[in-house]
Image: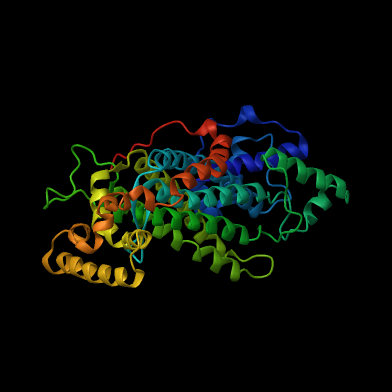
């Protein structure tokens, strides 16, 4: 509920205009019940709080809300909450980046099958794949910090943004109006306020912020989808408690429910971007009120959803489990096919004919593939090459040609370079926010 912020906003203008300090007259707790009763009479939320506030602080009652409009209270409060919400989310992304960076470094050189079209492709490493996830999160934390730094206060602007009521209040002294605007902006913790606005701040601000949150949702959805696919292959798993139950019927199940939850909530977060787009596009002239009710739902939901997504993602990244032997088994099933070009080049080096060797490899590869696809057996291409007299000149070199670490290119070095050049500077800026573990209770 923003009502406490409303009172703070009302008090800022009051104190700036008159220097009146009624802090000792304010109740310690927000008397929302009194405001609710008043709102039933007035059918106006801001005026209900103005009336109750005036009763509780009679010394300031004559000047509460003087010259202001409801959007002075509502929009400025929204901007404060948007700023504070961004300040909550940024450290949480930083913690997820930190956990994934440690994971990437630990597994920087562990080979694994790469996949394109979800079909086996050239090898990469477990750590390199984690760096793909990190790349997206770095974009997200940059975008969140950007919209946070660009956020401006609405300030003291009056009913249509002209500051006419305040110019009248200060008897035509424009400098005093500007000083009031500046003081209230600074009291709210902002360095800049809008020069131009209508009754509201532009709803494109909401679009900007929710676009960034939706983009974060897309990043998390991709990360957790990858984890779900890897869990299916039994290569990588999210944390699974000793007493956790995967299925009420199938006792053996180890469902990646945390990653599934992230994907589910991320879809909701991404869907919310349509709301501010439609709101901005249908605003009339200086303002129309059909932006109010939906924003109260949409903005809060977006931040709450992003918050729980990041809490859950942190929990997942703090407990990822890797199964190297399963990964190696999958590599062994595919690497013989990938290594055939190396075999051909090795034969040519000892005097073989490239075209003849290519045909030999083609025939043996199809025979091995038939064993896998038609008979459900392991890939025996290596054994076929080792027992074929044609390849006798390189039989002693075959195992070396199948060393998985020689198929990952610069991946291990890329990981370390990326962590040092792009990840660590970000983590250094947030070094005081990286402690603490995320616990998931349901």
Query: Quick check: 365 above or below 97?
Result: below
Foreground residue among 174 and 329: 329
Residue found at the very far top of the displayed protein:
24
Q: Quadrant of the C terminus?
A: top left
In the picture, measured across the screen, residue 266 lies left or right of residue 208, that is left
At x 29%, y 51%, the residue is 397
Question: Residue 127 in the image: x percent, y percent?
Answer: 40, 45
Question: Residue 100 in the image: x percent, y percent?
Answer: 42, 42
Foreground residue among 68 and 372: 372
* Colouring rule applied to residues: rainbow
Query: Quick check: 102 above or below 296?
Result: above
Residue 239 occupies quadrant = top left
At x 24%, y 67%, the residue is 365
Can residue 34 be seen? no
In the picture, measured across the screen, residue 377 lies left or right of residue 56, that is left
Foreground residue among 342 and 155: 342
Query: Quick check: 46 above or below 291?
Result: above
Foreground residue among 66 and 207: 207
Can residue 240 be seen? yes
Question: Residue 376 in the image: x percent, y percent?
Answer: 13, 63
Query: Quick check: 353 above or below 399?
Result: below
Question: Residue 187 in the image: x percent, y percent?
Answer: 69, 38
- What number of labels is visible? 0
At x 20%, y 48%, the residue is 254
In the picture, measured across the screen, residue 169 lies left or right of residue 125, that is right
Residue found at the very far front of the displayed protein:
351
């Amino acid at each position: 509920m923003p009502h406490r912020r409303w009172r703070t906003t009302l008090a800022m203008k009051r104190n700036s205009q008159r220097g009146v300090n009624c802090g000792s007259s304010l109740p310690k707790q927000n008397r929302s019940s009194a405001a609710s009763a008043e709102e039933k009479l007035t059918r106006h939320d801001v005026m209900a709080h103005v009336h109750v506030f005036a009763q509780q602080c009679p010394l300031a009652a004559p000047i509460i809300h003087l010259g202001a409009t409801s959007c002075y209270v509502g929009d400025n409060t929204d901007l404060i909450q948007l700023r504070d919400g961004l300040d909550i989310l940024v450290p949480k992304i930083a913690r997820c980046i930190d956990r994934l960076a440690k994971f990437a470094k630990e597994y920087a050189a562990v080979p694994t099958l790469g996949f394109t079209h979800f079909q086996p492709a050239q090898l990469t490493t477990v750590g390199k794949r984690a760096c793909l996830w990190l790349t997206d999160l770095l974009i997200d934390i940059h975008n969140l910090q950007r919209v946070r730094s660009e956020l401006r206060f609405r300030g003291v602007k009056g009913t249509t943004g002209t500051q006419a009521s305040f110019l009248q209040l200060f008897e035509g002294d424009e400098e005093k109006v500007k000083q009031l605007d500046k003081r209230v902006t600074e009291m709210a913790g902002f360095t800049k306020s809008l020069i131009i606005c209508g009754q509201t701040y532009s709803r494109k601000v909401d679009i900007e912020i929710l676009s960034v949150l939706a983009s974060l949702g897309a990043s998390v959805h991709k990360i957790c989808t990858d984890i779900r696919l890897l869990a299916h292959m039994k290569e990588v798993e999210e944390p699974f408690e000793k007493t956790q139950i995967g299925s009420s019927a199938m006792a053996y199940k180890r469902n990646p429910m945390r990653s599934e939850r992230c994907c589910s909530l991320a879809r909701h977060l991404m869907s919310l971007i349509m709301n501010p787009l439609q709101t901005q596009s249908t605003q009339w002239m200086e303002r129309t009120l059909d932006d109010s009710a939906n924003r109260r739902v949409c903005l809060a939901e977006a931040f709450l959803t992003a918050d729980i997504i990041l809490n859950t993602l942190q929990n997942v990244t703090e407990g990822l489990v890797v199964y190297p032997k399963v990964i190696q088994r999958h590599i062994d099933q595919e690497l013989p096919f990938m290594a055939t070009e190396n075999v051909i080049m090795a034969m040519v080096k000892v005097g073989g004919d490239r075209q003849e060797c290519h045909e030999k490899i083609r025939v043996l590869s199809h025979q091995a593939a038939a064993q896998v696809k038609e008979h459900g057996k392991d890939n025996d291409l290596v054994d076929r090459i080792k027992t074929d007299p044609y390849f006798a000149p390189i039989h002693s070199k075959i195992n070396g040609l199948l060393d998985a670490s020689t198929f990952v290119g610069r991946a291990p070095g890329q990981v370390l370079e990326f962590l040092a050049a792009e990840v660590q500077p970000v983590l250094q800026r947030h070094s005081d926010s990286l402690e603490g573990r995320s616990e998931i209770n349901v």
